[in-house]
Image: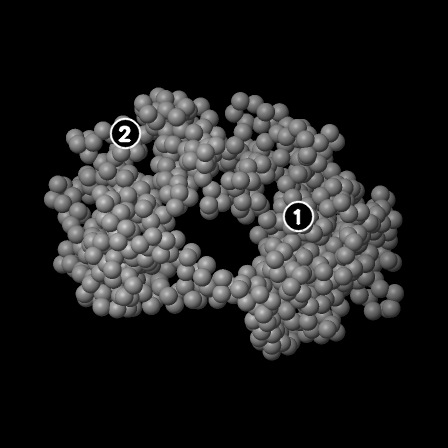
């Protein structure tokens, strides 16, 4: 069953506007008339700087009017950001927002002319102008300039927003006493339920297969197309009609003539004047998008058409960045401060030599913690054996006693909130899951199964079934999780990484904690007489994912996010195990785990030593160590060499088209930054050259009361 995704759209924003303004004061007929005043007019056909090839179509544009209500709505949606974050007063905020509205209108009109001219290249200017002028509504004119895909996307976006707004009201009707439900929390991966930008449901002929569901005739659930997959559980005509009426009530509540029951059939949602205006706004957005897409495609084609010579441009950018980093990261402290910035668009190309023990790298951390009672006992031991004069801060007996507690740690699957939290992400599968019989409860069905609609979740393999027994009731789930000790966890880790990547995971764990860890106080310190703790004593197990090319660090660095590589699959499997088991939730928000620098770190010494040991053995290495928080299963995702300086030897020709490789990501960064700069420059050029007193008229006296709000 697909899970319902409720998002706010333009309609939801309008509802918010109604609620906020309606709560401030009573709105009279005069106030309604005030809000419907035209406060600006834009017509770029009057621009002296308009290009000659566009002037032919200029008279077809007409004048865009900005209504005062638009400015107020815009303020309620974003104005607080400027006032709270940047200290703007009302006057400065409203002037800024007014400029944004006017600039957008200028850009839309210019884009319209550009698309008319582009269309004329495939026909004739006379034909295009005549056909455009024959359209009787603004929406029809916009549709003329767009292709079927753009029109369907605009219509889908509108209908989706309406359904989402009605859903929010119906949800309250269906579950009015749900205040105490869904209180469990568990971090979810980024990208859950994220729709693809170009998605809309289609029928066999490629037409939009999605409609508004209000419960009234013409808008019944059976007529809603693909919305039926998203409908709220328990919905009925009665609850839907009630929710739709409440939605309409919010639009009418402040008497801004958004809907008019005297002149409109309120049951016919799609033909309401306000909804038609919203549709025109959606088309307007598509007009702008199409213009920028065309402009950026032209820029990209110029780069791609250069063939292999484009690689010299990329290499030049690489060389410049490398030179800059060789200065910035010349010292270990310089690199250390940059480690946390690693991402799929920010790269570490250079690293200095270091004489420190360990090198630089990134690790995942699956923490199996002490229970509450064990933690209380540990606190007692820390108090009993505290000795600041000794390395580590405790007497040797403390570590022996801690080992006994470690042997009693059991962990369970932490994903109960994905069943019974605020959103039910669980679904049952009959095949493909990692379990004894391939069946089980997985999560994020939208991303895993409906890949035509939803984006995949990055660095998340998605096949690890809930570890335990699940009983599905009418309103919730009863979960009986399996209990795993550290040996069980290591076995689970090795088996799942093998399942996901196909690679053998080497390394063994001892089952005798007394033999595997510190046996007596004599073993605590190094045998060099230094009285320094030998943290090797706290390593319980270690090994490596034996992938074919894991011995080649260049390969591993280049293929970190390449979805077809074995090391990416292994990384994704371990990341999923983090979401399933770790109680160290801070690591779940990191790009590829915690960054670990050479030498001293801020981590506890047991973790620091174990992480350095694993990182020194390269990406794919893993180690289990004991610590004051419990067991740490550490997995190395990525390393930064501390010799040789250069982190990559790019092979642009071979890898630049392989999505997720270093070469591909670097190329996309270069291309995006270059095209973005060009587009930003182009936008500025249009506004600077076209926006003038000849094209824009503002009636400031009609919104002066908004500018003067701080003076009241």
Check disc 1 and report its element: helix, strand or loop: helix
Q: Position of residue 556 (x, y in %)?
A: 71, 59
* Residue under label 2: 268
Seen from the viewer's position, the closer of residues 108 and 298 is 298
Q: Position of residue 299 (x, y in %)?
A: 46, 64
Inspect this view and state whether residue 222 appears: yes
Q: Position of residue 652 (x, y in %)?
A: 64, 65
Q: Specify whether 271 is left or right of 529.
A: left
- Measure how far apart labels 2 and 1 are at the Cα level: 48 Å
Q: Are marks 2 and 1 in contact (CB under 8 Å)?
A: no
Q: Which residue is at the far left? A: 30
Seen from the viewer's position, the closer of residues 108 and 55 is 55
x 41%, y 36%: residue: 208
x 30%, y 34%: residue: 270
Check disc 2 and report its element: helix, strand or loop: loop
* Residue under label 1: 572
């Amino acid at each position: 069953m697909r899970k319902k995704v409720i998002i706010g759209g333009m309609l939801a924003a309008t509802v918010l506007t109604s609620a906020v303004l309606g709560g401030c004061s009573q709105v009279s007929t005069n106030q309604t008339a005030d809000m419907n005043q035209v406060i600006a007019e834009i017509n770029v056909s009057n621009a002296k700087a308009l290009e000659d090839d566009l002037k032919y179509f200029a008279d077809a544009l007409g004048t865009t009017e900005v209504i005062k209500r638009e400015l107020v709505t815009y303020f309620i949606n974003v104005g607080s950001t400027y006032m709270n974050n940047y200290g703007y007063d009302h006057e400065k905020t409203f002037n800024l927002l007014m400029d944004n509205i006017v600039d957008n209108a200028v850009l839309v009109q210019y884009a319209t002319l550009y698309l008319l001219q582009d269309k004329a290249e495939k026909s004739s200017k006379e034909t295009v102008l005549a056909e455009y002028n024959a359209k009787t509504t603004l929406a029809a004119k916009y549709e003329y300039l767009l292709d079927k895909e753009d029109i369907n996307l605009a219509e889908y976006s509108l209908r989706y927003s309406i359904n989402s707004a009605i859903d929010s009201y119906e949800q309250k009707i269906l579950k009015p006493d749900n205040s105490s439900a869904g209180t469990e929390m568990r971090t979810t991966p980024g990208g859950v339920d994220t729709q693809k930008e170009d998605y809309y449901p289609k029928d066999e002929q490629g037409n939009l297969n999605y409609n508004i569901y209000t419960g009234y005739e013409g808008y019944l659930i059976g007529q809603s197309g693909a919305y039926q997959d998203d409908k709220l559980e328990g919905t009925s005509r009665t609850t839907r009609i009630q929710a739709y009426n409440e939605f309409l009530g919010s639009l009418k509540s402040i008497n801004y003539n958004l809907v008019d029951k005297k002149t409109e059939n309120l049951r016919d949602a799609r033909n309401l004047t306000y909804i038609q205006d919203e549709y025109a706004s959606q088309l307007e957005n598509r007009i702008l998008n199409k213009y920028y897409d065309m402009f950026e495609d032209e820029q990209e084609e110029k780069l791609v058409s250069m063939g292999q010579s484009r690689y010299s441009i990329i290499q030049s950018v690489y060389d410049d960045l490398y030179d800059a980093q060789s200065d910035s990261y010349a010292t270990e402290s310089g690199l250390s401060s940059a480690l946390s910035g690693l991402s799929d668009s920010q790269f570490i190309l250079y690293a200095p030599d270091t004489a420190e023990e360990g090198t630089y790298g990134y690790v995942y951390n699956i923490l199996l913690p002490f229970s509450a009672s064990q933690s209380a006992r540990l606190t007692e031991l820390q108090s009993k054996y505290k000795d600041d004069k000794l390395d580590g801060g405790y007497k040797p007996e403390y570590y022996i006693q801690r080992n006994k507690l470690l042997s009693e740690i059991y962990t369970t699957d932490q994903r109960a909130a994905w069943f019974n939290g605020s959103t039910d992400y669980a679904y049952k599968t009959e095949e493909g899951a990692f379990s004894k019989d391939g069946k089980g409860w997985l999560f994020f069905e939208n991303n895993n199964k409906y890949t035509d609609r939803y984006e995949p979740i990055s660095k998340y393999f998605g096949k690890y079934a809930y570890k335990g027994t699940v009983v599905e009731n009418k309103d919730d789930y009863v979960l009986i999780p399996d209990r795993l000790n550290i040996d069980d966890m290591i076995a689970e880790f090795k088996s799942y990484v093998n399942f996901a990547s196909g690679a053998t995971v080497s390394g063994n764990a001892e089952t005798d904690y007394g033999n595997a860890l510190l046996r007596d106080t004599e073993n605590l310190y190094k045998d060099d007489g230094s009285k320094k703790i030998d943290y090797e004593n706290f390593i319980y197990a270690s090994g490596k994912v034996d992938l074919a090319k894991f011995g080649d660090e260049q390969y591993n660095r280049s293929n970190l996010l390449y979805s077809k590589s074995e090391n990416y699959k292994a990384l994704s499997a371990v990341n999923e195990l983090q979401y399933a088991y770790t109680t160290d939730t801070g690591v779940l928000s990191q790009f590829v785990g915690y960054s670990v620098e050479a030498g001293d770190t801020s981590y506890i010494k047991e973790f620091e030593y174990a992480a350095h040991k694993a990182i020194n053995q390269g990406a794919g290495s893993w180690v289990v160590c004991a610590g004051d928080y419990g067991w740490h299963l550490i997995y190395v995702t990525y390393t930064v060499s501390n010799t040789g300086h250069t982190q990559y030897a790019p092979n642009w020709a071979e890898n630049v088209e392989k999505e997720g490789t270093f070469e591909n990501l670097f190329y996309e960064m270069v291309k995006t930054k270059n095209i973005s700069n060009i587009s930003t420059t182009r936008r500025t050029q249009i506004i600077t050259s076209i926006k003038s007193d000849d094209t824009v008229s503002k009636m400031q006296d009609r919104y002066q009361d908004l500018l003067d709000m701080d003076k009241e």
